[in-house]
Amino acid sequence: MVLKAFFPTCCASADSGLLVGRWVPEQSSAVVLAVVHFPFIPIQVKELLAQVQQSSQVGVAVLGTWCHCRQEPEESLGHFLEGLGAVFPHEPWLQLCRERGSKFWSCKATHRQAPATPGAASEDQVMLIFYDQRKVLLSQLHPPAALPDRQAGDATASTGGLAAVFDTVARSELLFHSDRFDERPVRLSHWQSEGVEASILVELAKRASGPVCLLLACLLSLVSAAGACRVFKLWPLSFLGSKLSTCEQLRHRLEHLTLVFSTQKAKDPTERMRKANTLISVLLDVALGLALLSWLHGKNRIGQLADALVPVADHVAEELQHLLQWLMGAPAGLKMNRALDQVLGRFFLYHIHLWISYIHLMSPFIERILWHVGLSACLGLTVALSILSDIIALLTFHIYCFYVYGARLYCLKVYGLSSLWRLFRGKKWNVLRQRVDSCSYDLDQLFIGTLLFTVLVFLLPTTALYYLVFTLLRLLVVAVQGLIRLLVDLVNSLPLYSLGLRLCRPYRLAAGVKFRVLEHQAGRPLRLLMQINPLPFSRVVDTYRLPSCGCHPKHSWGSLCRKLFFGELIYPWRQREDKQD
C-alpha cells in the first residue's frame, strides 16, 4: 500500500525530532504539522497535543520521527529515534530522514504489530508531498465546478483528501502560536517558528472595533425601529416607499451596515468574506459619493444645472408638441380616423400644457432641491444615482401618462377584437374553467358584434400609432433608468475584497492544487511539490457576489414582447407579483 505524507517545506531544514500531525485513514494520508525538537519530556508533549485536540477538535498525534543528518550520522541517534515508537504508539510509524550533504530523502512506514499473513511485508511505500504551510493555512479550498455525471464521483473522491489537508492545517492554528523566542518546555518548528506574524496597527484596530461596532449597532437598531414605525406604513408613505428607488436603496444600505457592524463573530470563512466584501462596497460607495459631492459643489455646478434644467424641459415639451401635431395630420402618409386623431391629439397637448406650467411653477425651487440632492451624495454614490433615477421618473411623468393612456386604449381594443372574433366563430371564453367553449348566439347578438368589430377594426390603426410612439418614448426613459439601475447594482453586488485577494494573493482563494515532480528515481521515494491553483475571476464573482436590492421586476425578452403586443403595462410601475383570479 502507498501512503501519502504531506510535509511542510518550512520543516525541511529543521533539526531532528518528532513528527506531529494528523493521520487520515480514509485517504491513507499523514499530514505533518510541526516537528518537536530535542530535548523534550514525553508527558509535556502529550499535554501539548491534548490541548491542541481540545481546542481544534483535530486528532493530532505523534506520527513518527524526523532525522536531519547535518553531520556524520550517529548510531545512537538512530536507535534512540527508533525507540520513541514505544513511547508514542501510532500505526503506521513514519520514519523520514534527509541525508547529509545530499538532496535525497529516505521514507519508511513500519507496522510494529505482527502482519496477518506470514511473510507479508511490514513496511509500506511512502509518497512524500511538500506543501507551503502558510499558504495552505490562509487559503480557502472551494468545491469544484459542476461536472458531468460521469465525472462528478471522480471529482468528489479527488478533492476529499485535499479538503482533509486544508481543514487539518486551518483548524490546528493553535499549534503555530509559539516561536523559538518563547520559553516553553516543548520547542517546535513550523511556519511561524522564526517569529509570529503580527501587526500593532491590526491589534489596535481589533481592540477598538468592539466598542465602535457596539455603538454603531445600537444606532442602526434605533434607525431600523424608527423605520418600522406605523406612520411609515400608512398608504401614501408605504406606496412611495415601495415605488421610489431611493427608499429601496436606503433600506438595502441599512441591511449592509447592520451586517458589517454586527457584534456577532462570523461563523465560517464564507460569512467573513461576505462581511469584508460588504464593508469594502460601502466604503467605495461613500468615497465615490464624496467625490461627486465635491465636484458638484465646486465652481457653482449646481447653479449651472438648475439654470439648464428648465430650458431642457421646455425643449422636450416643445418637441412633444411638434410630434403630436405631426400625428394629428397625416403621419408618414397614413390615413387616420380624423375625429379620434383630433381628440387624442388635443388631449395629450393639454397634458403637455399642464406639465409646462408645473415646471415653471417649480423653477424658483429647483436650485435648492438640487443642492439637497447633491448633499445626499455623502450617503454614497448609489443613493445619489437612485435619487437621479427618481428625478428622471418625475420629470418624465407626462410621458408615462401618455404611455398609460395609449396602452389602456390599445389593450381595450385588442381584447375587444379578440372577444368579437370568438363571437364570429361561435365561441366564448369560459371564465370559470379558463378555456374557450362553444356557444350559440342569436341574430341580434351577431349583428351588434359585427358593428362593434367593424368600428374597432377601423379605429385600431389610429390608437396603435399613438400607442407605438409613446411606447418608444417610454422605453427610452426605461432604458436610461435601467442603465442607472445596472450601475447601482454593480456597486452594490461586486465582491471587491474577493477580487483584490485574487489579484494580490491568489493562493487565498484556492480552486484546487497541482503537483510538480521533484524526484522520481528507482529505489527512492517519490517526492512531489503541491502548488495551489487560484480560483478564476469569473468564479470569484459568481461565488462571492453580494445580493442586490432587486427593487424592480425582471422580464424576459419573450414576456416583454408579449406585454408590448397586448398593451400591458411594463416596468417599473407594475408590481412584481401578478394578481391571480
Image (cartoon, rainbow, N blue to C red):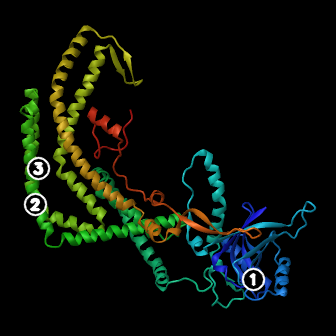
Disc 2 residue type? Ala
Disc 1 residue type? Gly
Whichever of callouts 3 and 2 sits on the residue coming sooner in the sequence is 2
Whichever of callouts 3 and 1 sits on the residue coming sooner in the sequence is 1
Q: Which residue is mark 1?
A: 17
Residue 17: % across, % down: 75, 82
Disc 3 residue type? Val
Q: Which residue is found at the position 9% from the left and 48% from the top?
A: 317
Q: Tell me if I can see residue 229 in this picture.
A: no
Q: Quadrant of residue 289?
A: bottom left
Residue 393: % across, % down: 22, 51
As helix, strand or loop, the secondary structure at mark 3 comes to helix
Q: Which residue is found at the position 64% from the left and 63% from the top?
A: 162
User: Badge 1 local density, few (<14 within 10 Å), some, or many (20+)?
Assistant: many
The numbered disc on residue 316 is 3
| Residue closest to the eye, 321 or 543 | 543
Whichever of callouts 2 and 1 sits on the residue coming sooner in the sequence is 1
Q: Which residue is mark 2?
A: 308
Q: Which residue is found at the position 75% from the left and 70% from the top?
A: 524
As helix, strand or loop, the secondary structure at mark 2 comes to helix
- Rendered position, 241 above or below 379: above
- Rendered position, 443 above or below 528: above
